[in-house]
Amino acid sequence: MNNRTTADLAEKYDTVAYVGQPNPLTHPAHLATVATLFGLAPPSVDTCRVLEVGCGDGANLLPMAMALPHARFVGCDIAPRAIEAARAVAAELGLANATLLTEDLTSLPAHVGDFDYIIAHGLYSWVPALVRDALFTLAAQRLSINGVLFVSYNAYPGCHIRRAAWDILHFHTDAIVDAQAQIKAARTLAGLLAEPGATHEASDALLREEFRRIESRSDSALFHDDMGSPNDPIYFHEFIAHAQRFGLDFLAEASLPMMSVGGLSANMSRFVAGMGRLVREQYIDFARMRRFRQTLLCRAAPSTTGIVITAIAKMYVSAATPLIRSSLAGKDPGAALNAEGSGGEQSTHEVATLRELLRWLVAQSPRAAPVAEVKAWYRARTPPAQPEIETILAEACMRGLVQLHVDAPAATFLADEFPVASPMARWQASRQEQITNLRHEALRLPDAAARRVLALLDGSRSRVALHTTMAVEWPESRVDEIRQRIDDYLGHFAKLALLS
C-alpha cells in the first residue's frame, strides 16, 4: 500500500478500535488436524512458527502463544494503538514467544523468517488488491512446504444481499465526518429499514433481515466490516484462481461441515455428487447462498479429494462444542441426530450407536478420547460387517457432531483438589467478561463471582482454601452453600475447557 492508504486505514482502526476475539478455526492445532485429514503432513504444532497478519490487539494470537510456549508467534498490523495494546498484554503475561510489529504486509521485513501457519482473518476482503497480492506472495515465499494459509473473506452469492445493505448505509453516512456519528446514523437507519412494512416482492424480506442483523452488531463490527472501505466480496472460484496464480492450492474449508451437502435437498446433493472438488465447492456456495468463507490453502495440495480415513486412527476425538453447550442447558446430545437427520445411508444400528457415542463423548468432555479407545468401545457394541469407526467419525466430523484432533487437547474434564485454570483465562477473568478457553473459543462469563473464582485457580489453592477465600465475599451464605457453589463453578469450568 502507499503511505496515504496505509495511514487512512490505520487511522480508522485507531479511531474505532476493532474488538478482537479468538477464532478456534485459526488455531495451529486445528489447521494441522484438517491438513492431516486431507493428506498433508503438516509441521508439528508444539514447535511451529505462526504469523497472523492483521492481528489487531492480539485477542486471537496471544492465547495461542500462551498455550504453545515452545512455538513462535509473530503478529503484524498497521494500527499502532492495536499493536501497543497487544504488546502491553504480552508483556504483562510474560509471553517471550510473541513478537508484535506495526508493519504493512507489503513490506514485512525478511528477518521475521518463514512460517508453518499463516493466518489472515478479516483481512482479504477489506484491503486493496495490492495487499491481497502481497498476502499470496508472502505465502508463496515464506510458507513451509507443508504449511497452511488460513484466509477468511466475504463471499458471493450471499454478499449480494449484504452489498445492497452496505450501499444504502454508505449513501446515508459517507458525508458524516465523525466516526461515532456515522455508526449512530447507520444503526438508526438499519433499525428503520428492518421494521416490517409492505413489500413488492417476497425476496424483500432478505434485505429486511440483513438490516436486523446490522442493527444488532457491535460498533467495531458495524464500522469496520459493514461500513468498511474497501470491502470486496468474491466468488470462491475467483478466490481460488487468484491463489493459483501464486502457486497456492485449495486444501479444505476450515469449517469442515461447510464442505458437506448436509441440509441441502436430495436433488441438489445428487446434482453436485459427480462434480470435481473445486466446482462442487462453488455450487455448494450457490445452494447455501454462502456469504463468508474461511479457506485453507497450501503450497502443494495432496492428490486426495476427500478425507483420508486411515489418518483418523492415530487421532483423538471429542464432542463438538455445540453439543457440549447444549448438554449444559439440559439437552440430550443424542438429539442432535434427530435435529439434523440420520445421515442418509446410515443403518438404524449405526445411528443408534452414533447417538450413544455422542452421549459418551459429552459425558467426559472436554476430554478428547484416543480413536483407538473409541474403536474398542465401538467394537464391543457393534456386530461384524458394520462400517469401521474411522468412517463413522469422518462422517460425524463433516456433520459438525465431533471434533478430531492430531494431539490431545490440554483441557481436563475433572477439577482436582488444587484446580488450575489456564493463565490466559485467569488474567482475562480479573479484567473482563470475555474469556478464552483451552479450545481457543470465546466464552462470556457475566457472573462476577464466577470470574472471581476463576481468577483464583492458579494451582496454589485447595478447594478448602477456595471455600475460605470466597466465604469472605459471600458472608450471607452457609458453609455447605459455599462449598456447593464452588463445586458447581468448578464443574462448569471443566465442561467449558477452562481447566488444565
Image (cartoon, grey):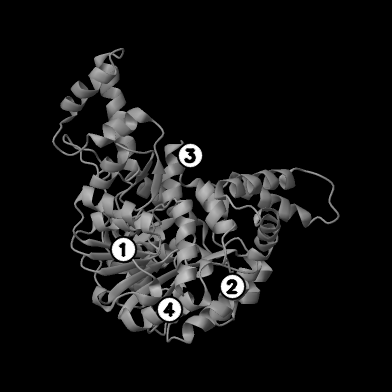
Mark 4 vs 1, N-terminal side: 1
Which residue corresponds to mark 3? 331
Q: Secondary structure at mark 1?
A: helix
Which residue corresponds to mark 4? 134
**Distance between the Cα atoms at labels 4 and 1?**
26 Å
**Distance between the Cα atoms at labels 2 and 3?**
39 Å
In the shown orientation, is residue 79 left or right of residue 420? right
**Vertical comparison of 155 with 333: above or below:** below
Q: Are marks 4 and 2 in contact (CB under 8 Å)?
A: no
Picture quadrant where residue 302 is located? bottom left
* Type of the residue with mark 1: Ala
Could you say which is closer to the camera, residue 86 or residue 234?
A: 86
In the shown orientation, is residue 408 left or right of residue 279? left
Which residue corresponds to mark 1? 29
Q: Nearer the viewer, mark 1 or mark 2?
A: 2
Q: Secondary structure at mark 2?
A: loop
